[in-house]
Image (cartoon, rainbow, N blue to C red):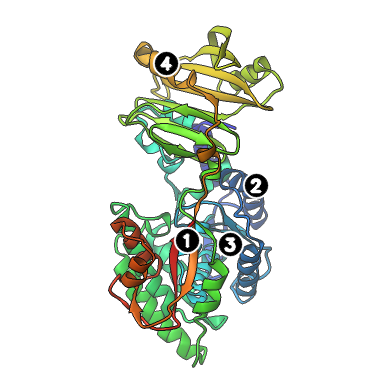
């Protein structure tokens, strides 16, 4: 469940031991790589189940089949057709796509934002390009470990942060940031591969416009897909030029865009947060499927993933995390966690909160001079509920513990059964594809549908790659957001 940051760095550093020269499949040049092909493929195989556990697969067989079919078609014409490829859509609202050796992942968030198959194919080619050019194993890959876990960057002490990571080696692979040259090369390969299976790579250039608008909406926080590029505009221009060149080379006179068929495929997919994975409202976390709730301290930041729910104080001095604990009894669960985090128990007692049996444990981790980490004190509640044992842990440095103790306890003892039917039955937003019945604008369509909230209107405009004033001709399909 938990590996600390150091062990990840060791894994990455240790791969340098396997330095050797190999021929790069894309450039045909000799390249200093960090591991053999067999090791590289194994790394992907090991990481895949961890990535699925972290994000979950998006339950839509038609879309999963679609990405697999297109991915395999493209891999076959790539520079590296001989290895096995797997393509997956993961259940995340974040707009992102990423690749590890042999595996390509698209989020449902990015699938919702494409407006045709050609945009999708361009990004698919980009991700396959990272694999064929062996970027993960080349020296251009450098790990930015601070990215692991959305909260990790803001936690002041790396020792505290490690509790929020749950970062296995597999997940750490996702945060290997490719250098700018690798991203440029992947863009080129995206154009090449998508052109070779007859898609219009000009559409890929247009998609950078969508990404730019998404990043502006998120206070200029770039999606990972763009983050190593200071200038998506420049990238758009380059891709556009390359698209023209490749279409000439491939003699593509009528390249595929496939707008309507793509929109029909994503009609009905979940958009934004899916309440069944748990959601935050009014400083409370609700889990409608596991049927529990607990309060969140005011002004704390939160991060929800299928494996854990994390909360951190805005100044990063303390964090709390809820996850499932292993073991059949509270004591077994506690023993496993104490061992896993390498803690020393200071105090423990059994109690009842809201009718549930709880084992409370205070445990310490000593200071480590070498890692320059302070002494840590933790409070854990092991809670028996339903057929599960939940573990909520609060972590801070030993000197601050007396300050956070009450806050930790108040949150943990607020864990209770969720009975509110409105929360239990909460439905996600979905993409709905509609056909314009007359000549109109996107803005008018939304007004007629009663969508008046400014933020939601802008979100829908971005989803369509349009402005609200943009004319929509009769018969054109557009996306709206619906329940
Ligand atoms: Zn990339």
Upstream in the sequence, badge 4 or badge 2? 2
Residue that mark 1 sits on = 110
Between label 1 and label 4, give the one nearer the viewer. Answer: 1
Q: Is mark 2 within 8 Å of ligand 1?
A: no
Upstream in the sequence, badge 3 or badge 2? 3
Upstream in the sequence, badge 4 or badge 3? 3
SS at circle 1: helix
Camera-nearest residue between 362 and 235: 362
Q: Quadrant of the N terminus?
A: top right
Upstream in the sequence, badge 1 or badge 3? 3
Residue that mark 3 sits on = 22
Residue 479 appears at what percent x and percent y? 44, 68
Residue 450 appears at what percent x and percent y? 36, 62
Residue 402 appears at what percent x and percent y? 37, 10
- Compared with 325, 231 (above or below) is below
SS at circle 3: strand
Give the left or right position of residue 216, taking residue 57 as reference.
left
Residue that mark 4 sits on = 375
SS at circle 2: helix
| Whole-number angstrom distance, CA of label 3 to CA of label 2 | 28 Å
Residue that mark 2 sits on = 49
Between label 2 and label 1, give the one nearer the viewer. Answer: 1
Between label 1 and label 3, give the one nearer the viewer. Answer: 1
Q: Is mark 4 within 8 Å of ligand 1?
A: no
Give yes or no for contact between labels 2 and 1 (Cβ–Cβ under 8 Å).
no
Q: Quadrant of residue 331?
A: top right
Upstream in the sequence, badge 1 or badge 4? 1
Camera-nearest residue between 466 and 79: 466
Residue 343 appears at what percent x and percent y? 54, 16
| Whole-number angstrom distance, CA of label 1 to CA of label 3 | 34 Å
Give yes or no for contact between labels 3 and 2 (Cβ–Cβ under 8 Å).
no
């Amino acid at each position: 469940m938990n590996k600390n940051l150091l062990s990840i760095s060791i894994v990455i550093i240790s791969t340098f031991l396997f330095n050797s020269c190999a021929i790069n499949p894309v450039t045909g040049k000799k390249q200093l790589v960090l591991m053999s092909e067999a090791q590289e493929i194994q790394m992907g195989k090991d990481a895949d189940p961890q990535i699925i556990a972290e994000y979950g697969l998006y339950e839509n067989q038609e879309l999963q089949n679609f990405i697999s079919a297109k991915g395999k078609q493209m891999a076959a014409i790539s520079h590296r057709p001989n290895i096995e490829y797997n393509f997956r859509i993961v259940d995340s609202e974040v707009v992102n796509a990423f690749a590890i050796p042999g595996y390509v992942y698209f989020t449902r968030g990015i699938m919702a934002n494409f407006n045709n198959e050609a945009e999708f194919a361009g990004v698919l080619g980009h991700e396959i390009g990272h694999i064929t050019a062996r970027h993960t194993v080349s020296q251009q890959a450098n790990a930015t470990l601070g990215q692991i876990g959305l909260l990790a960057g803001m936690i002041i002490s790396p020792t505290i942060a490690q509790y929020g990571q749950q970062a296995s080696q597999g997940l750490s692979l996702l945060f290997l940031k490719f250098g700018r040259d690798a991203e440029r090369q992947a863009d080129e390969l995206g154009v090449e591969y998508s052109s070779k299976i007859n898609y219009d790579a000009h559409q890929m250039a247009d998609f950078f416009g969508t990404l730019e608008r998404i990043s502006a909406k998120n206070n200029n926080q770039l999606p990972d897909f763009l983050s190593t590029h200071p200038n998506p505009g420049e990238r758009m221009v380059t891709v556009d030029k390359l698209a023209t060149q490749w279409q000439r080379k491939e003699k593509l006179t009528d390249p595929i865009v496939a707008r309507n068929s793509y929109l029909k495929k994503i009609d009905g997919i979940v958009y934004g947060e899916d309440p069944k994975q748990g959601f935050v409202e009014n400083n409370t976390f609700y889990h409608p499927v596991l049927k529990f709730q607990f309060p969140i301290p005011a002004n704390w930041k939160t991060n929800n993933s299928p494996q854990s729910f994390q909360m951190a104080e805005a100044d990063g001095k303390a964090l709390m995390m809820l996850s499932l604990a292993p073991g059949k009894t509270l004591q077994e669960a506690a023993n496993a966690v104490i061992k896993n985090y390498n803690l020393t128990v200071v105090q423990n007692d059994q109690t009842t909160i809201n009718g549930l049996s709880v084992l409370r444990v205070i445990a310490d981790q000593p200071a480590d001079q070498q890692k320059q980490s302070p002494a840590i004190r933790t409070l854990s509640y092991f809670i028996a509920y339903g057929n599960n044992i939940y573990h909520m842990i609060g972590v801070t440095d030993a000197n601050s513990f007396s300050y956070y103790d009450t806050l930790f306890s108040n949150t943990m003892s607020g864990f209770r059964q969720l009975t509110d039917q409105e929360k239990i039955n909460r439905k996600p937003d979905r993409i709905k594809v509609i056909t314009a019945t007359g000549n109109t604008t996107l803005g008018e369509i939304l007004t007629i549908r009663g969508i008046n909230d400014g933020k939601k209107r802008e979100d829908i405009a971005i989803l369509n790659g349009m402005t609200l004033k943009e004319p929509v001709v009769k018969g054109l399909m557009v996306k709206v957001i619906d329940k």
